[in-house]
Image (cartoon, rainbow, N blue to C red):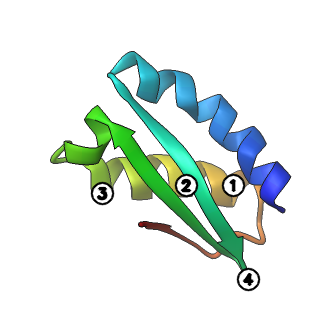
Amino acid sequence: MRERVEVVLAQIRPALQADGGDVELVDVNEGVVKLKLKGACASCPVATMTLRNGIERMLKEQIPEVEEVVAV
């Protein structure tokens, strides 16, 4: 499943990088995806919204086994 998550993150990454940020996959375990927001995303006041409404939504749509996305 880790490889599938990386494929989806590769689709999302250009939008984050355009705003000076990025995302790093830390771990995938039993449906929980752990991500680290980097650059401008790490200190952005709407980072939680980006994580939930953007990244988590896309991951769940494309990989039904994903149950939750958490920032670490």
Q: Nearer the viewer, mark 2 or mark 3?
A: 3
Q: Amino acid at mark 3?
A: Thr
Residue that carries the numbered disc 2 in the rendered image: 57
The residue lying at 66 percent from left, 30 percent from top is: 11
* Quarter of image, res 13: top right
Tell me: residue 14, above or below residue 48: above
Q: Are marks 2 and 1 in contact (CB under 8 Å)?
A: yes
Q: Earlier in the sequence, mark 4 or mark 2?
A: 4
Q: What is the secondary structure assignment of the residue under circle 4?
A: loop
Q: Are marks 1 and 3 in contact (CB under 8 Å)?
A: no
Residue that carries the numbered disc 3 in the rendered image: 48
Give 26 or 70, whichever is nearer the viewer: 26
Q: CA distance from mark 1 to mark 3?
A: 18 Å
Q: Nearer the viewer, mark 4 or mark 1?
A: 4
The residue lying at 33 percent from left, 23 percent from top is: 20
On the picture, is 42 further left or further right than 29? left
Residue that carries the numbered disc 1 in the rendered image: 61
